[in-house]
Image (cartoon, coloured by chain):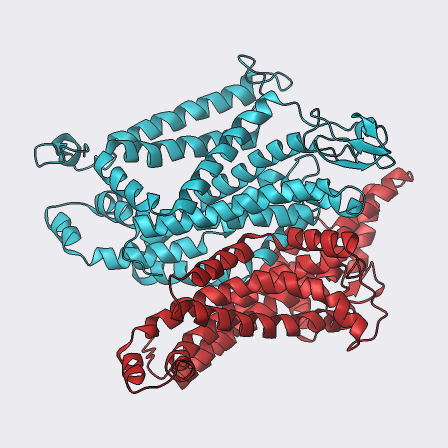
Amino acid sequence: MAGESDTFESVDWEETGGRFSTLSRRDRWALATVVGLLAAFVYDYAILPADRPTITVPVEWNVTQLDWLFVSTLLALLLYVAVPLYNNRRLTAYYWREFRKNRMAILSLVYLLVVFLIGVVGPLFLDKPVLAVERAYQPPVFTSVDAAVPVDCLGAVVEGRCQGTMAHPLGTTGDGKDILVLVVYGMQVSMKVGLISTLLVVTIGTAVGTVAAYGGGLVDELLMRYVDVQLVFPAFFLYLLLTYLFGGSLFMFIVIFGLTGWGSIARLVRSEALQRAEEEYITAARSAGAGTLYVIRRHLIPNVSNSVITAATLLIPGFILFEASLSFLSLGDPTVPSWGQVIATGRGDLSTAWWVSTFPGVFLFTTILAFNFMGDALRDALDPRQET
Amino acid sequence: MRWYVVRRVLWAVVATFLILSVTWGLLAVTPNPAAEQMQFQAAASGGSAEAAEEAFEARRGLDRSPWVRYQEYMTNMVTLNWGWSQSRSQPVIEAIAAALPYTAIYSVPTTILSILLGLAIGLYSATNQYTKSDYAATFFAFFGYAIPNFWFGIILLLVFGVQLGWFPVVFDSDIPFFSLGMARQLVLPVVVLVTGTIAGVMRYSRAEALEYVEAEFVKTAKSKGADGYRILTRHILRPAAVPLMTILVGDILGIFLAASYLVEVVFGIPGLGQLSYNAILAQDTSLVLGTTLIFTFVSVVGNLVQDVAYTVLDPRIDYGDR
């Protein structure tokens, strides 16, 4: 379907002709990308020596397991969100008009894009913050603190008060780590947690939901009873117990969130799919000889995708907050500078160094707020049936 | 309806059973940190790590078959024999019982406050839809929903505890319950928790009340000259109360449990959350398990109460065979 010329003549008969060709051109692209990524992954792990970084030009970047997952997530976003929006310009323009009505949502979108871009690019250029006791407790720029607080004041000392410098615009922690750098690294951590877990959750949830709705009978019963059990566990305590037992590397967090958080999406998809399956166009497609897989892929999933996208946008802030909370409880990986962890390190210095906990918290709060605003506006734009 | 309630209760029992089984399975497949420590110590002092492991397993009864261990675990769980807390040198159940009053003393005022305030603001927003105060209330709801509780607690401590000195920074558990001093040091935790939970109550009560603001019977009441307060309480709140009640129990409980855990850690209140946190730090597995399970059971029971209340309070709902 190509934008303006969305007519009978523009239907791609090649695509609908073959009985087995349930894959669209986009899916073939996705498949090719997956194969390419897998090849690169195998090359990185099997052929390159472990101590050599994967990429040296233009910047040195040793791609970790998590980075591979993150890259796949971004490609999936590109292929299944950006490309369809671009191909379907008329619909995109309509969504945009609806979305634009909410000014807070536009602001949130811009903010999130900035956080996302800085989070993805920043850590490639900034060195990881290192322990430097001589730079401990530097105040943020334009503020000052009693000269006794920092070990060695880098800025000017005026009337016994240490002034902040542009070298550390948001100050430093008790370990002498620059807070701005920590915040930038934290952006990447939060984006990874939010996006990768959500992609896992959406994939598993959609698969389980459609299979349950279409399989019916015993399959449906078993899958949905399993979802019931999974949802009985309050999410926070399930994550708490699992990270306590299995250790909390960032990779583990994402796996745990992704593998246990899909219950609500599966329920949503199932109920939506059951409603859609009753509609005439599905009956028409079936009587024209379309197979189950074809109907699911071409008719069911595109029609439930709007509510799934909305629900997913509202899931992201939850995952980010869970990760921050667990890192705050020192269950996370101490080598990964996440916002929650920096907040935790600043807790003990509240009376002397207020800035350590404050800045990462501000970013955490605004990110969660922005995702909530955006989810709300998306619901209004994508899902006119739903009234709140 | 009775049949539905019976089945709902049975499902809660089955769910509890499944949760216990799953946690047993998780414990069985993960290495015990205490055992690892013993092995490390044995190896460090020149002994054999395997011998230490075997001795540890024999002492804990881990050399028996999984089925026997599973049975024993389940019996212990049901008879409230939840094991021995290594870090506190007392039975887990005693540690939990000692911590419970501290959790209760701030949760009860929080629950009452957030329900009353949330309902009041939500109803006010609904009857004054699209006014400035409605927007302000919506914004406040978003704020409360999005702000990370633990960070908000830290900021309040920083401003009102450290800078202004109005409230104590460190929680003093020696102050007797039901005293002014106790009330004073509970102000900040209660404020943090209320801001977090009130958002849900407000948004739901606004949405529910909006369904009835334009209803025919409300217009009739208005045309017959009923005053605003009477319309609000008799014609809007009454039908909205049923769905609201269920939301209050289920969703709010979920947010509240997680929030109270973190808030206790931030404010140093020696309740269940703090107990669990210290157990995590001390790698005291049986205490971690006990404290997480308590929260989970509260949530299971809360959901049960919610569903049963729904059927009892709203005779319109017909559950048929499902």
Q: Quadrant of the C terminus of chain B?
A: bottom left
Q: Nearer the viewer, residue B126 or A213?
A: B126
Q: Is residue A359 left or right of residue A101?
A: right
Colour for chain B in the figure: red
Q: Position of residue B59 (x, y in %)?
A: 81, 58
**Residue found at the very far top of the displayed protein:** A57
Q: Position of residue A109 (x, y in %)?
A: 43, 39
Q: Residue sitting at 78 percent across and 33 percent down?
A: A175
Q: Is residue A105 left or right of residue B104?
A: left
Q: Position of residue A310 (x, y in %)?
A: 38, 49
Q: Nearer the viewer, residue B302 or B187?
A: B187
**Residue found at the very far front of the displayed protein:** A159
Q: Position of residue A368 (x, y in %)?
A: 52, 47
**Residue found at the very far left of the displayed protein:** A9
Q: Is residue A254 left or right of residue A158?
A: left
Residue B10 visible? no
Colour for chain A in the figure: cyan
Q: Nearer the viewer, residue A232 or A18?
A: A232
Q: Residue sitting at 52 percent across and 62 percent down?
A: B199
Residue B275 visible? yes
Q: Residue sitting at 87 percent across and 43 percent down?
A: B42
Q: Residue sitting at 48 percent across and 40 percent down?
A: A195
In the image, is residue A317 above or below residue B80? Answer: above
Q: What is the quadrant of residue A87 in the picture? A: top left
